[in-house]
Amino acid sequence: MNVQSAIYSVKNGSLDKKLVRLYGKDALEAQKNRYISAIEEFADLFGQNREISIFSVPGRSEISGNHTDHNFGCVIAGSVDLDIIAIASKREDSVLHIKSEGHAADVVDINKYTTPNEKLFGNSASILAGVAKGLLDAGYKVGGLDAYTTSCVPGGSGLSSSAAFENMVGTMINHFYNDGAVSSVEIAKISQFAENVFFGKPCGLMDQVACAFGGIVAIDFADPKEPVIEQLDLDLSGAGYALCIIKTGGNHADLTDDYAAVPAEMKAVARALGVNVLRETNKAALTEKIPELRETVGDRAILRACHFFDENERVAEIKAALKAKNIDKFFEGILASGRSSFCYLQNVYTTKNVGEQGVSLALCLAESYLKEVGGAWRVHGGGFAGTVQSFVPLAKVEGFTKAIEAVFGEGSCLALSIRPDGAIKLM
């Protein structure tokens, strides 16, 4: 389908059913305008006569399992109705040319950029090269493409804009060169490889899996090469609640060491206990060794290991509550997860700048507002300078938003929905 045919299809309602499924009825017209604008931007960049495809990949919200995936633990996460969309066209060479709204274009020849380059760590071009290399190593075909992308997944929001972008690159190459044969799990694993090895950022696999799959998923990473993924049902609105994400606006500069220290310290405890990751041992073994561990790995590492074991059990409890549609038990688990993250995992603020504690403040405000009306709150995602997750009664969303935005500014409170689909090709 060429540019003009695609614009006509969006205008005449051919995509309406899919767009309503992804964004809801109230957002239909705004999303149609967004897609048309993106197609026009692609045409201005790459030409009016190109045959195009349209893709969408959601952000994700971690529901439970804070910093457990990198030690082969269990998590629950869900995709949200904020996404990256891409308008893309196949090329005849090996160049990936991707222009993202608000950013300089990335142009990578994937036949030349085939090994990690530390000088390019943190550069989005490394994601392109890493995803292509991962697909090639897994036995899939790769090739060039032109794409324009636009995202409403806020960077640094704990909603995994980076994982969504990685999945988008993999999804486009999958459909252009492999007829969609690469599974969602494989795309997620290749995306993680790109971020770890080419981008230079240590991370687990939860973000990529949640963005790729869609809906609510429980993931067991006991075998990270073959994670066990179970779809769950969470009808928040039916239960009378909304999912609100508070963006605290914290400074994310120089936080890589903070994020990296969490898995590193957990794994240091694991090695001291004679295993590679904490999932291979248990809390009883940890407790027995605490006196000597204090001397070798330090107190914070022990506390973070305690969080891992308790959080892993909480994931099972929260999963059971979701299956039983017991919203009160679900909220109990969310609150316990948040307390453990603050007290033991200690990822609510960076020790590099203890005067800046936006996440702590947001948690305090959420508790003050919600403890009388019901709901739950916890640090969201990686933490340190990011976001807070709140489950807010529908009748209180307006007041809650007003109270939060009075402190953190207009647009700092996002009311979201769970999106049923993960990384998809729409047209």
Image: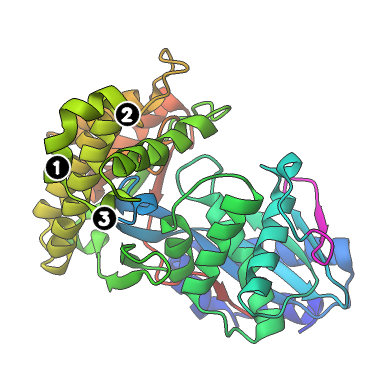
Q: Residues within 10 Å of mark 3 (few under 14, many from 20)?
A: some
Callout 1: helix, strand or loop? loop
Looking at the picture, which amino acid does disc 1 mark?
A: Gly
Asked where in the image residue 264 lies, by quadrant, the reply is: top left
Task: Tell which of 59 and 281 is nearer to you.
Answer: 281
Q: Is residue 163 left or right of residue 132?
A: left
> Which stretch did the figure color magenta?
101-113
Tell me which residue sits at (26%, 55%) in the image.
Answer: 280
Asked where in the image residue 294 lies, by quadrant, the reply is: top left
As drawn, which residue projects farthest toward the top?
A: 355
Callout 3: helix, strand or loop? helix
Q: Are marks 2 and 3 in contact (CB under 8 Å)?
A: no
Task: Tell which of 114 and 209 is nearer to you.
Answer: 114
Dot label at residue 280: 3
Q: Earlier along the polypeptide chain: callout 1 or callout 2?
A: 2
Dot label at residue 48: none
Q: Which residue carries the number 1 mark?
A: 374
Q: How is the image coloured?
A: rainbow
- Residue 188 location in percent, x, y? 51, 66
Q: Earlier along the polypeptide chain: callout 2 or callout 3?
A: 3
Q: Is residue 52 left or right of residue 62?
A: right
Looking at the picture, which amino acid does disc 2 mark?
A: Val
Looking at the picture, which amino acid does disc 3 mark?
A: Glu
Tell me which residue sits at (75%, 61%) in the image.
Answer: 148
